[in-house]
Image (cartoon, rainbow, N blue to C red):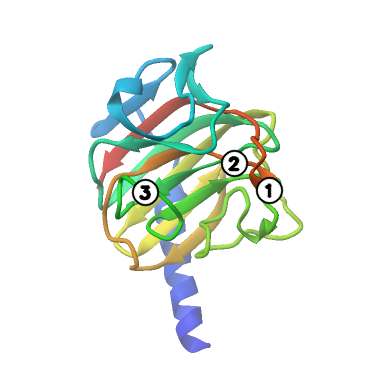
Amino acid sequence: MKRLSVISMVLLVVTFTFFGCAIQPHGQGWVTLIDGDKGLENWNRIGDANWRTEGGAIMADKGKSGFLVSKNSYKDFVIYAEFWAETDTNSGIFLRASDPNKIGSDNAYEVNIWDTRPDPTYGTGAIVDFAAVPVPIIYKAGGKWNTYEIYAKGTELTVKLNGAVTASTQNSKFASGPFALQFGPGVKGITGGPIKWRKVQIKSL
């Protein structure tokens, strides 16, 4: 119990230090990978999702499953992303993937986007299997533009959705690797709603 209290205090300090002021994604050190409908060339495609440029964003809405995988690997970083999802969209940002050719929550930290996930414990705003969100669901992304701000430094990971810290954890399972944007299957494998990315930026720490 004492150990858990110490860990909680550390996470609170990290969260306050990092999120006490707004991220400046246009400042020094930021690398822009998606900007409107530009940037598809910055990613490797895995799976059969129909990634394309449309309406000022990069999007996918068909296929069994697919990822845009960053061409570079990252260890400590901040990600800023703007995305649009439907209520039934299954998507997310996978961090420090250990196998860039086979992305999954078993070899990366998955920051989820899925309002209708069958097990809502790790729905939108959660880090799947590592940091849960409150149930009943209070964090939702469907039907609007949203922002993710994700901090990863050493064992510390913190997620902020639309200005609210939704998940924080300390974990050392995955140390470095590329990150990936997902278009995933819906409930029971049925095609879910589209995912659109209009801004994705990363800053190494």
Classify 10 Å Cα crowding around label 2: few (below 14), some (14-19), many (20 and above). many
Disc 1 designates what residue? 188
Q: Amino acid at mark 2?
A: Pro
Residue 27 in view in this figure: no
Q: Which residue is mark 2?
A: 185
Residue at image x 30%, y 52%? 99
User: Count the marks: how many?
Assistant: 3
Label 3: which residue?
102
Q: Relative to 107, is 20 on the left or the right?
A: right
Whether pointer 1 and pointer 3 mark residues with C-beta atoms closer than 8 Å, the reply is no
x, y percent for residue 101: 32, 45
Q: How many C-alpha atoms fall within 10 Å of the one at disc 1: few (<14), some, or many (≥20)?
A: few
In the figure, residue 119 lies in which quadrant?
bottom right
Question: Label 2 near label 3: C-beta < 8 Å?
Answer: no
Q: In this view of the protein, can residue 50 be seen by the observer?
A: yes
Q: CA distance from mark 1 to mark 3?
A: 21 Å
Q: CA distance from mark 3 to mark 2?
A: 15 Å
Residue at image position (38%, 58%) is: 107
Element type at mark 1: helix
Q: Where residue 144 sits: x, y (%)? A: 65, 28
Three-letter code, disc 1 = Lys
The residue sitting at 34% across, 21% down in the picture is 39
